[in-house]
Each structure stands twice: as structure tokens, then as C-alpha cells.
Image (cartoon, helix red, strand yellow):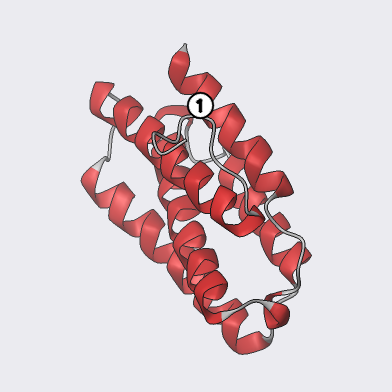
Amino acid sequence: MRSLTVIVAAAAVLAGAVGAAAQERSPADRQTLMDLAYVLGRSHALRQACAGPADQFWRTRMQRLIDTETPDAAFDGRLETAFNTGFAAAQAAFPRCNAAVRREQVRAAERGRALAATLTGTVAEDDPSR
């Protein structure tokens, strides 16, 4: 159940990933937040492929990110667009739950964890550069 462990670890990192308001973030950090929103959208679609459309796990995490970052209206819209783009891309590529979806969930979780680690200035546990 390594994939579940990776996903849970990524969720834990995401929960602690935020600390500064989006307005206080550097341009690089704002781009990382955009990338993270895309990965969260992607993860949301992948999870829904297996758990069904009622599952809101990753959408809830995205809402927490926005609530914590308190972005201005323009950046909030960009984060929302990134999330929706990631969702649509994964939904189109992985419409049904199968082994490929499970592998992609692990990759998305690892990418999300790496992005969150970048925002917090920590090193992801499985970072090979450690």
C-alpha cells in the first residue's frame, strides 16, 4: 500500500505547506503554488476515477490552500484555473480506475509533496538529492 502512504504523506505536507499569504510570496513561490494547484486538480480527477464523483478529498485540500494563502482575486482565479486544468487533463487521460490511474496517483502525490517541500523549504523524504 505504498501509494496510499505516499498520498497520505503528501496530504500531510500540503497541510503544512502554507504559511505566508500569497501576496507575500515571491514570484517563484507563486508559480510553485500554481503548479501545486494543477497537481491538486490532477489528483482530484485521479481519485474520483476510482472513488467516484462524490469524493472531494483533493478539492477540500485545494480550498484549504486558498483559505490559508488568502490570494488576491486575480491570483485566486489563476489558482482555480490551474486546479481545473489539472483536473480536466487527468480526467481526459484517465477516465476509468485501473492500474495506470493508481500509478499516476503515486506520481502526482510525489510531485505535490516535492512542490510543498519547496514552499516550506524542507526536503521531501524521498528526494534523491538528500
Q: Which of 13 and 100 is in front in this view?
A: 13
In the orientation shown, which residue stands out farthest toward the top? Answer: 1
Residue drawn at 67 percent across, 36 percent down: 12
Could you say which quadrant of the image residue 18 lies in? bottom right
- SS for tag 1? helix
- Residue 130 appears at what percent x and percent y? 47, 35
Residue 90 vs 25, above or below: the answer is: above
Please state if 116 lies on the left or on the right of 64 as rendered.
Answer: left
Residue 71 vs 87, above or below: the answer is: below
Residue 108 vs 27, above or below: the answer is: above
Q: Nearer the viewer, residue 127 or 4?
A: 127
Residue drawn at 58 percent across, 82 percent down: 75
- Residue 27 appears at what percent x and percent y? 53, 81
- Residue 8 appears at what percent x and percent y? 60, 28
User: In the rendered structure, which amino acid carries the disc numbered 1?
Assistant: Val
Residue drawn at 57 percent across, 51 percent down: 116
Please state if 124 lies on the left or on the right of 15 as rendered.
Answer: left
Residue drawn at 38 percent across, 58 percent down: 86
Please state if 109 lies on the left or on the right of 107 as rendered.
Answer: right
- Residue 88 appears at what percent x and percent y? 34, 58
Q: How many labels does the image show?
A: 1
Q: Mark 1 points at which residue?
A: 6
Please state if 126 lies on the left or on the right of 97 as rendered.
Answer: right
